[in-house]
Amino acid sequence: MAVSPSFRSFVVEQLGGERTVQARPMFGGVGLRMGDAFFGLIDDDTLFLKVDDATRPEYERRGCRAFDPFKNGQVMRGYYEVPAEVIDDREVLTAWRDQSVGVARASRKRAKPASGKPKKRPPPRR
């Protein structure tokens, strides 16, 4: 789960630089945020971006693999590897980043109750 400083720096710069993307240590890897959106991660010098049912097919078409945090085949289908040719092309990578940020923000909205407040549970029956 190691991330080399040089790969981390390169990816953050390609994603838009430190003013745009915050990279923080997370469970031996690096979590990537843009504003309020957790949109990606770096693990073993591999960039993974957040996907949903609409964006996942493009990653699969390119032969990308889902994130396997424990290297045991128990994958997290919400994050997929980014191909090297995309990482190398800053313009293309920025578009993929923006798409993943949108996925992250949409998933946060679905997770919140409509009022923005947690729902109250009825008192237990006695």
Image (spheres, rainbow, N blue to C red):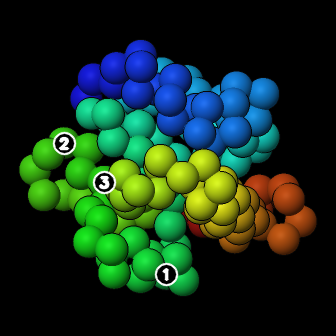
Residue 11 percent across, percent down from the top left: 51, 35
Task: Say what secondary structure mark 1 lies in.
Answer: loop
The amino acid type found where label 1 is placed reads Asp
**Which residue is situated farthest in the top direction here?**
5
The dot on residue 73 is none
| Residue marked by disc 3 | 67
Horizontal side of residue 28 vs 96, given as left or right: left
Which residue is at a point 70% across and 48% down the rendered structure image?
37
Task: Say what secondary structure mark 2 lies in.
Answer: loop
Q: Which one is earlier in the sequence, the residue at label 2 or at label 1?
A: 1
Q: Which one is earlier in the sequence, the residue at label 1 or at label 3?
A: 1
Which residue is at a point 65% across and 55% down the rendered structure image?
91
Horizontal side of residue 25 vs 27, given as left or right: right
- Pointer 3: residues within 10 angstroms few (<14), some, or many (20+)? many
| Residue marked by disc 2 | 70
Residue 80 percent across, percent down from the top left: 38, 60
Task: Note whether residue 91 is visible.
Answer: yes
Residue 4 position (above or below residue 115): above
Task: Say what secondary structure mark 3 lies in.
Answer: strand
Location of the N terminus (image quadrant) = top left
| Residue marked by disc 1 | 53
The amino acid type found where label 2 is placed reads Phe
- Pointer 2: residues within 10 angstroms few (<14), some, or many (20+)? few
Front one among 68 and 19: 19
Which residue is at a point 69% across and 39% down the rendered structure image?
16
